[in-house]
Image: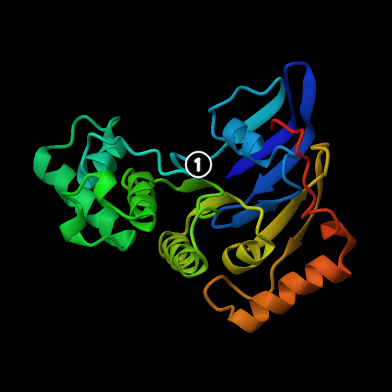
Amino acid sequence: MLQLNGIGHAFLGRTVLDEINLEIAAGELVALVGPSGCGKSTLAHIAAGLIDPRRGRINRRYFRHGIIFQEPRLMPWATAAENIAFGLVAERRLGCAACCQRVEDAAAQAALNPADLAKFPAQLSGGMRQRVAIARALIAKPDFIFFDEPFSALDVALKRRMQDIVIETVAARSLSGLFITHDLSEAVRVAHRIAVMDRSGRGIAGSRPVPSSPGLRDDRMVFETAHAFLNEDPLFAHVNDYDERSIA
Protein backbone atom coordinates (compact mmCIF):
# COMPACT_ATOMS: atom_id res chain seq x y z
CA MET A 1 0.00 0.00 0.00
CA LEU A 2 2.90 2.35 0.68
CA GLN A 3 6.54 2.13 -0.39
CA LEU A 4 9.24 4.59 0.62
CA ASN A 5 12.45 4.13 -1.34
CA GLY A 6 15.65 5.99 -0.49
CA ILE A 7 13.87 8.95 1.13
CA GLY A 8 16.17 11.76 2.20
CA HIS A 9 15.51 15.24 3.57
CA ALA A 10 17.31 18.18 5.16
CA PHE A 11 16.38 21.32 7.10
CA LEU A 12 18.61 24.40 6.75
CA GLY A 13 21.40 22.27 5.33
CA ARG A 14 21.22 19.69 8.12
CA THR A 15 20.37 16.16 7.00
CA VAL A 16 17.54 14.75 9.11
CA LEU A 17 16.57 11.74 6.98
CA ASP A 18 18.71 9.62 4.71
CA GLU A 19 18.09 6.39 2.80
CA ILE A 20 14.75 5.60 4.42
CA ASN A 21 13.18 2.46 2.99
CA LEU A 22 9.85 1.23 4.35
CA GLU A 23 6.95 -0.84 3.01
CA ILE A 24 3.47 -1.20 4.50
CA ALA A 25 1.24 -4.01 3.29
CA ALA A 26 -2.51 -3.99 2.76
CA GLY A 27 -4.34 -4.24 6.08
CA GLU A 28 -1.14 -3.63 8.04
CA LEU A 29 -0.70 -0.94 10.70
CA VAL A 30 2.99 -0.22 11.23
CA ALA A 31 4.14 1.74 14.28
CA LEU A 32 7.28 3.81 13.78
CA VAL A 33 9.34 4.42 16.90
CA GLY A 34 12.75 5.93 17.53
CA PRO A 35 14.58 8.51 19.63
CA SER A 36 12.89 11.90 19.96
CA GLY A 37 14.15 14.17 17.19
CA CYS A 38 15.18 11.41 14.78
CA GLY A 39 12.68 12.55 12.13
CA LYS A 40 9.67 10.27 12.59
CA SER A 41 7.05 12.99 12.08
CA THR A 42 8.99 14.48 9.19
CA LEU A 43 8.96 11.09 7.49
CA ALA A 44 5.20 10.74 8.03
CA HIS A 45 4.60 14.20 6.57
CA ILE A 46 6.72 13.32 3.53
CA ALA A 47 4.88 10.02 3.07
CA ALA A 48 1.55 11.85 3.27
CA GLY A 49 2.61 14.46 0.72
CA LEU A 50 2.72 17.41 3.12
CA ILE A 51 6.47 17.86 2.58
CA ASP A 52 8.45 17.14 -0.58
CA PRO A 53 11.52 14.96 0.04
CA ARG A 54 14.92 16.12 -1.15
CA ARG A 55 15.44 12.71 -2.73
CA GLY A 56 13.86 9.30 -2.98
CA ARG A 57 10.63 7.90 -4.35
CA ILE A 58 7.19 7.35 -2.81
CA ASN A 59 4.77 4.79 -4.22
CA ARG A 60 1.22 5.15 -2.90
CA ARG A 61 -0.94 2.23 -3.93
CA TYR A 62 -3.98 3.23 -1.93
CA PHE A 63 -6.89 5.32 -3.17
CA ARG A 64 -7.19 7.91 -0.41
CA HIS A 65 -5.54 8.66 2.91
CA GLY A 66 -6.45 10.49 6.10
CA ILE A 67 -4.18 12.19 8.65
CA ILE A 68 -4.59 12.52 12.42
CA PHE A 69 -2.13 14.95 13.98
CA GLN A 70 -0.81 15.29 17.52
CA GLU A 71 -3.04 18.34 17.95
CA PRO A 72 -6.67 18.16 16.73
CA ARG A 73 -6.23 21.28 14.54
CA LEU A 74 -9.93 22.08 14.53
CA MET A 75 -11.43 25.29 13.17
CA PRO A 76 -12.53 27.16 16.33
CA TRP A 77 -15.38 28.99 14.57
CA ALA A 78 -16.97 25.76 13.32
CA THR A 79 -19.04 23.19 15.20
CA ALA A 80 -17.84 19.63 15.68
CA ALA A 81 -20.12 18.52 12.85
CA GLU A 82 -18.78 21.24 10.54
CA ASN A 83 -15.19 20.30 11.41
CA ILE A 84 -15.91 16.66 10.59
CA ALA A 85 -17.65 17.61 7.33
CA PHE A 86 -14.53 19.52 6.25
CA GLY A 87 -13.07 16.12 5.43
CA LEU A 88 -15.57 15.97 2.56
CA VAL A 89 -14.41 19.20 0.94
CA ALA A 90 -13.22 17.31 -2.17
CA GLU A 91 -16.55 15.51 -2.61
CA ARG A 92 -18.65 18.39 -3.87
CA ARG A 93 -21.34 16.25 -5.46
CA LEU A 94 -22.69 15.03 -2.14
CA GLY A 95 -26.09 16.43 -1.22
CA CYS A 96 -26.88 17.85 2.20
CA ALA A 97 -28.65 14.71 3.41
CA ALA A 98 -25.80 12.44 2.29
CA CYS A 99 -23.24 14.76 3.90
CA CYS A 100 -25.13 14.78 7.21
CA GLN A 101 -25.35 10.99 7.16
CA ARG A 102 -21.61 10.69 6.53
CA VAL A 103 -20.94 13.06 9.45
CA GLU A 104 -23.13 10.97 11.75
CA ASP A 105 -21.49 7.71 10.62
CA ALA A 106 -17.95 9.05 11.10
CA ALA A 107 -18.87 10.50 14.51
CA ALA A 108 -20.24 7.12 15.58
CA GLN A 109 -17.04 5.38 14.51
CA ALA A 110 -15.07 7.81 16.67
CA ALA A 111 -17.45 7.19 19.61
CA LEU A 112 -18.73 10.76 19.59
CA ASN A 113 -21.99 11.55 21.31
CA PRO A 114 -24.52 12.99 18.80
CA ALA A 115 -25.29 15.76 21.29
CA ASP A 116 -21.70 16.99 20.98
CA LEU A 117 -21.86 17.56 17.23
CA ALA A 118 -23.44 21.00 17.65
CA LYS A 119 -20.75 22.17 20.07
CA PHE A 120 -17.73 24.31 19.21
CA PRO A 121 -14.18 23.09 19.96
CA ALA A 122 -13.90 25.37 22.99
CA GLN A 123 -16.86 23.53 24.52
CA LEU A 124 -15.24 20.10 24.12
CA SER A 125 -12.66 18.33 26.26
CA GLY A 126 -9.26 17.43 24.84
CA GLY A 127 -10.35 13.85 24.28
CA MET A 128 -13.54 14.91 22.52
CA ARG A 129 -11.61 17.28 20.25
CA GLN A 130 -9.33 14.42 19.27
CA ARG A 131 -12.38 12.24 18.52
CA VAL A 132 -13.60 14.99 16.17
CA ALA A 133 -10.19 14.91 14.45
CA ILE A 134 -10.46 11.12 14.09
CA ALA A 135 -13.96 11.42 12.63
CA ARG A 136 -12.76 14.08 10.19
CA ALA A 137 -10.06 11.67 8.97
CA LEU A 138 -12.55 8.81 8.64
CA ILE A 139 -15.39 10.64 6.89
CA ALA A 140 -13.75 10.50 3.47
CA LYS A 141 -13.51 6.69 3.82
CA PRO A 142 -9.73 6.43 3.43
CA ASP A 143 -7.96 3.12 2.94
CA PHE A 144 -4.75 4.41 4.55
CA ILE A 145 -4.32 6.60 7.65
CA PHE A 146 -1.29 8.47 8.98
CA PHE A 147 -1.23 8.88 12.77
CA ASP A 148 1.27 11.51 13.91
CA GLU A 149 1.57 10.92 17.69
CA PRO A 150 -2.17 11.59 18.01
CA PHE A 151 -2.58 10.67 21.68
CA SER A 152 0.66 11.88 23.28
CA ALA A 153 -1.07 14.78 25.08
CA LEU A 154 -3.85 12.65 26.61
CA ASP A 155 -3.93 11.04 30.04
CA VAL A 156 -3.48 7.28 30.36
CA ALA A 157 -7.15 6.27 30.56
CA LEU A 158 -8.21 8.51 27.67
CA LYS A 159 -5.24 7.41 25.58
CA ARG A 160 -6.30 3.80 26.03
CA ARG A 161 -9.83 4.56 24.81
CA MET A 162 -8.47 6.36 21.77
CA GLN A 163 -6.21 3.39 21.03
CA ASP A 164 -9.27 1.11 21.23
CA ILE A 165 -11.01 3.27 18.62
CA VAL A 166 -8.00 2.95 16.31
CA ILE A 167 -7.81 -0.81 16.80
CA GLU A 168 -11.53 -1.29 16.18
CA THR A 169 -11.62 1.01 13.15
CA VAL A 170 -8.55 -0.47 11.47
CA ALA A 171 -9.90 -4.00 11.97
CA ALA A 172 -13.45 -3.21 10.88
CA ARG A 173 -12.40 -1.48 7.66
CA SER A 174 -9.18 -3.41 6.91
CA LEU A 175 -7.26 -0.14 6.84
CA SER A 176 -3.52 0.23 6.43
CA GLY A 177 -1.57 2.91 8.25
CA LEU A 178 1.59 4.40 9.68
CA PHE A 179 1.41 5.19 13.40
CA ILE A 180 4.09 7.53 14.76
CA THR A 181 4.63 7.23 18.51
CA HIS A 182 7.31 7.64 21.17
CA ASP A 183 5.49 5.19 23.46
CA LEU A 184 6.63 1.61 22.87
CA SER A 185 3.71 0.18 24.87
CA GLU A 186 1.31 2.07 22.61
CA ALA A 187 3.09 0.67 19.56
CA VAL A 188 2.81 -2.87 20.94
CA ARG A 189 -0.88 -2.38 21.67
CA VAL A 190 -2.07 -0.99 18.32
CA ALA A 191 0.32 -2.19 15.61
CA HIS A 192 0.91 -5.35 13.64
CA ARG A 193 4.60 -4.52 13.23
CA ILE A 194 7.02 -2.04 14.81
CA ALA A 195 9.70 -0.34 12.71
CA VAL A 196 12.59 1.40 14.45
CA MET A 197 14.14 4.55 13.05
CA ASP A 198 17.91 4.91 13.26
CA ARG A 199 18.87 7.30 16.04
CA SER A 200 20.25 9.79 13.48
CA GLY A 201 17.54 9.31 10.88
CA ARG A 202 19.89 7.25 8.71
CA GLY A 203 17.46 4.63 7.54
CA ILE A 204 15.20 2.15 9.28
CA ALA A 205 17.31 0.16 11.72
CA GLY A 206 14.95 -2.82 11.57
CA SER A 207 11.45 -4.00 12.41
CA ARG A 208 9.75 -6.60 14.58
CA PRO A 209 6.32 -8.22 14.25
CA VAL A 210 4.15 -7.98 17.35
CA PRO A 211 2.75 -11.35 18.54
CA SER A 212 -1.01 -11.92 18.31
CA SER A 213 -3.35 -9.31 16.81
CA PRO A 214 -4.33 -5.80 17.97
CA GLY A 215 -7.43 -6.09 20.09
CA LEU A 216 -6.47 -9.54 21.40
CA ARG A 217 -3.50 -8.38 23.49
CA ASP A 218 -4.20 -8.01 27.20
CA ASP A 219 -2.35 -5.59 29.49
CA ARG A 220 0.07 -8.24 30.71
CA MET A 221 1.05 -9.24 27.19
CA VAL A 222 1.55 -5.58 26.17
CA PHE A 223 3.71 -4.88 29.24
CA GLU A 224 5.81 -8.03 28.87
CA THR A 225 6.36 -7.54 25.13
CA ALA A 226 7.37 -3.89 25.48
CA HIS A 227 9.65 -4.79 28.41
CA ALA A 228 11.29 -7.59 26.41
CA PHE A 229 11.86 -5.31 23.41
CA LEU A 230 13.47 -2.63 25.58
CA ASN A 231 15.62 -4.91 27.72
CA GLU A 232 16.44 -7.85 25.49
CA ASP A 233 16.41 -6.65 21.88
CA PRO A 234 19.35 -4.43 20.77
CA LEU A 235 17.18 -2.93 18.05
CA PHE A 236 15.27 -0.96 20.71
CA ALA A 237 18.32 0.16 22.72
CA HIS A 238 18.02 3.84 21.76
CA VAL A 239 14.27 4.37 21.29
CA ASN A 240 14.01 6.44 24.47
CA ASP A 241 16.97 8.71 23.69
CA TYR A 242 16.31 12.42 23.33
CA ASP A 243 18.15 15.08 21.33
CA GLU A 244 17.16 18.56 22.54
CA ARG A 245 19.02 20.18 19.65
CA SER A 246 16.99 18.45 16.97
CA ILE A 247 14.50 20.41 14.86
CA ALA A 248 13.05 17.40 13.04
- Per the image, label 1 sits on a secondary structure element best described as loop
Q: Position of residue 180 (x, y in %)?
A: 61, 49
Q: State the count of labels.
A: 1
Residue at 78% x, 54% y is 239
Q: Position of residue 66 (x, y in %)?
A: 44, 42
- Classify residue 100 as left or right of residue 186: left
Q: Residue at x 78, y 16 (%)?
A: 13
Q: Which residue is mark 1?
A: 62
Along the viewing direction, whichever of 167 and 160 lies nearer the viewer = 160
- Say few, some or many: other residues with alpha carbon within 10 Å of mark 1 (under 14 / 14 to 19 / 20 or more): some
Quarter of the image where the N terminus is located? top right
- Tell me: residue 192, above or below residue 245: below
Residue 49 placement (x, y as % from top left): 54, 29
Which residue type carries mark 1? Tyr
At a point 17% along the width and 36% down the height, the residue shown is 94
For this orientation, the residue located farthest to the top is 13
For the point 17% across and 43% down, the residue is 99
Q: Locate residue 37 relative to residue 108 in the image: left or right.
A: right
Give the percent coordinates (x, y) of residue 41: 62, 39
In the depicted view, which residue is nearer to us: 245 or 185?
Answer: 245
